[in-house]
Image (spheres, rainbow, N blue to C red):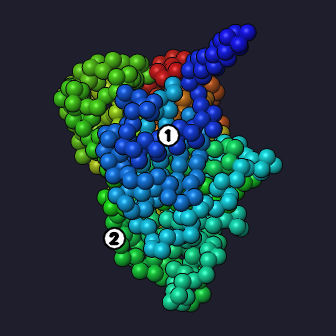
């Protein structure tokens, strides 16, 4: 009987273990245990007992390292205080940690992220803050209660709401607008264990309390502080990576890169009586950052932040590519294309290419026919957050000038997806003269205060298509000086009368929004397969692909608001038009539209990515 009982226990244990192995999913408690095992292995300099994938990737303070390097060599002790915060995400099989650690006998604030696939650790982040204040800040002795207490059921919100609230913090900094994020009145921010917003701690002896001092800003509420513009030295925050969402605890952990271009100097300060500016003397630099947010009822209550210093301006975080690196990748791609040789590119094993809506093997299509380029007409849109970079411009195909748009999607710094849209110029006809010179605005860098957040730029780009479909220029935020060009030809905003006169001249000379409200675009039935890809906040550019659908109806378009014109014939019949657009967005309005597309007779065209 005793043997039978033991056997049953063994079978039960084996059964449970086998089930766990089959699913290879850890619950929250299991993820926390794994993190503790990882930290212990770090201190012991021995990864042997960890479930590391063969191709595990480790990034420490933005540098790619091998297991056994970095903290694997320099760790000397684990948690030396009670300061430990875990953010465990069973849904995404990831776990984050922020706590005190010891390196070479000295205390450090440590942020760690582990990502699992099929029960194996595939990705690891180490972020180290080495500038610990002496004496040790109280915030690094033990965590604030809100960071270690489970969320109350009545205050829980969806994962999507938690992430949206957390990401809004970065938008609030970029815009100097405390209303851009849902801060609770009680919200307090800690950086390196020290309260840097809504501080309640007594001032240290001798601390400056004058108007405009850091102590004064540090005692302001989270949103109130951002409204002053004191964070205006932060140009933008990109390469944002959601590390883990802990629904049980109401916590979100995010890694990001803070970019600082040294402007403006001085910083204009608002809402501080008697104080109007602060010097910005730090120049150009980057800061890698990790943040943990406590979300209750959709609002931010605690922000726990740490950073790594000594990072070059506009550097990559080790996982993504920065905007300059994305631009360089596109230039490499274009050079390889012109040379018909993709061998030097970092192509993923499963890379996919779609050219003019057709799935195309690497080496075919434009890879065979490109013979040169690009020319001086070249626009590159780089998006570090999505890992995408796009090009629109003039290249050479079969030794003839050709307009093209190209999109690259990078994952872990490898090219995973490629789009080619090519306006084949088989007869070698000269391109529109406008394709030999760039509009300066498409190349200009936007001042910080003229920028809008990534998500808002996507909404604005999509609103352009809606304005066309709804025959209403009021649907999209067009600037009065907006000009639209299509394959180089000015099709709206031709205020200087640059184009030759024809039966479309009256419409061409209208403002972008005004033109759409006449109904002259009502021959466009729908705009589908809208794919907004790269959003370049630095340049204020958005790149998108779409397919313009035309059913051939109505045969006669009704025109409104144009004296002497009440209708216009629609003689083109059914056709499709795959298109690429670049929008210049400044202060939330569309100022320039650069579009290219080609005619495809008939109906039913697909994007090639279905």
Counting from the top left corner in percent of width and height, residue 479 is at 53, 57
User: Is 275 displayed left or right of 387 in the figure?
Assistant: right
Badge 2 density bin: few <14, some 14–19, many ≥20, Cα 10 Å: few
* In front of the other: 551 or 338: 338
Which residue is at 34% across, 39% downward? 67
CA gap, disc 1 and disc 2: 41 Å
Q: Which mark is residue 37?
A: 1
| Residue 375 versus residue 442 in the image, above or below | above
Residue extending farthest to the front is 2
Counting from the top left corner in percent of width and height, residue 258 is at 43, 59
- Element assignment for label 1: helix
Q: Which mark is residue 432?
A: none
| Residue 400 versus residue 200 in the image, above or below | above
Which residue is at 50% across, 32% downward? 116
Quadrant holding the N terminus: top right
* In front of the other: 373 or 554: 373
Counting from the top left corner in percent of width and height, residue 529 is at 54, 29
């Amino acid at each position: 009987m005793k043997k039978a009982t033991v056997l049953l226990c063994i079978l039960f244990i084996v059964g449970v273990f086998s089930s766990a192995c089959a699913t290879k999913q850890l619950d929250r408690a299991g993820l926390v245990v794994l993190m503790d095992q990882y930290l212990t292995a770090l201190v012991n300099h021995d990864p042997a007992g960890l479930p590391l994938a063969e191709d595990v990737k480790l990034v420490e303070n933005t540098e790619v390292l091998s297991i056994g390097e970095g903290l694997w060599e320099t760790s000397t002790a684990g948690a030396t205080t009670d300061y430990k915060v875990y953010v465990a995400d069973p849904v995404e099989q990831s776990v984050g940690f922020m706590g005190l650690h010891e390196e070479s006998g000295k205390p450090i604030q440590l942020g760690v992220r582990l990502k699992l696939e099929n029960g194996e650790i595939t990705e690891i982040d180490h972020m180290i803050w080495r500038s610990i204040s002496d004496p040790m800040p109280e915030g690094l002795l033990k965590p604030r209660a809100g960071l270690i207490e489970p969320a109350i059921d009545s205050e829980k919100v969806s994962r999507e709401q938690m992430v949206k609230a957390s990401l809004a913090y970065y938008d609030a900094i970029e815009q100097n607008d405390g209303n851009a994020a849902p801060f609770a009145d009680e919200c307090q921010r800690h950086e390196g264990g020290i309260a840097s917003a809504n501080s309640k701690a007594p001032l240290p002896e001798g601390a400056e309390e004058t108007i405009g001092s850091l102590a004064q800003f540090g005692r302001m509420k989270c949103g109130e502080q951002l409204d002053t513009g004191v964070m205006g030295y932060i140009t933008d925050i990109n390469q944002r990576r959601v590390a883990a969402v802990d629904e049980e605890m109401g916590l979100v952990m995010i890694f990001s890169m803070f970019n600082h271009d040294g402007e403006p100097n001085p910083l204009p300060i608002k809402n501080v009586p008697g104080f109007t500016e602060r010097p910005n003397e730090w120049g150009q630099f980057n800061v890698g950052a990790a943040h943990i947010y406590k979300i209750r009822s959709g609002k931010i209550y605690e922000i726990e932040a740490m950073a790594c210093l000594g990072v070059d301006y506009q550097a990559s975080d080790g996982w993504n590519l920065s905007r300059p690196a994305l631009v360089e990748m596109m230039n490499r791609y274009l050079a390889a294309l012109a040379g018909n040789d993709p061998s030097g590119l970092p192509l993923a094993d499963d890379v996919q290419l779609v050219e003019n809506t057709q799935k195309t093997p690497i080496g075919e299509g434009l890879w065979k026919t490109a013979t040169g380029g690009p020319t001086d007409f070249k626009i590159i849109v780089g998006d570090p957050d999505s890992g995408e970079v796009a090009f629109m411009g003039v290249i050479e195909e079969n030794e003839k000038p050709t307009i093209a748009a190209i999109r690259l999607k990078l994952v872990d710094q490898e090219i995973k997806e490629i789009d080619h849209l090519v306006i084949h110029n088989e007869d070698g006809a000269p391109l529109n003269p406008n394709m030999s010179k760039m509009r300066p605005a498409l190349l200009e860098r936007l001042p910080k205060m003229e920028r809008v957040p990534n998500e808002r730029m996507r909404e604005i780009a999509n609103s352009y298509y809606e304005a066309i479909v709804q025959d209403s220029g009021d649907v999209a935020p067009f600037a009065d000086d907006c000009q639209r060009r299509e394959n180089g030809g000015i099709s709206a905003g031709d205020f200087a009368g640059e184009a030759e006169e024809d039966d479309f001249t009256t419409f061409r000379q209208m403002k972008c929004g005004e033109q759409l409200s006449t109904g002259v675009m009502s021959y466009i039935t729908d705009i589908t397969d809208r794919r907004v890809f790269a959003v370049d906040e630095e340049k204020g550019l958005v790149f998108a692909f779409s397919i313009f659908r035309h059913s051939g109806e109505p045969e006669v378009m009704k025109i409104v608001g144009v004296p002497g014109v009440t209708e216009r014939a629609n003689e083109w019949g059914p056709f499709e038009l795959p298109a690429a657009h670049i929008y210049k967005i400044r202060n939330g309005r569309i100022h320039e539209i650069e579009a290219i597309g080609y005619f495809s007779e008939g109906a039913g065209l697909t994007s090639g990515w279905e």
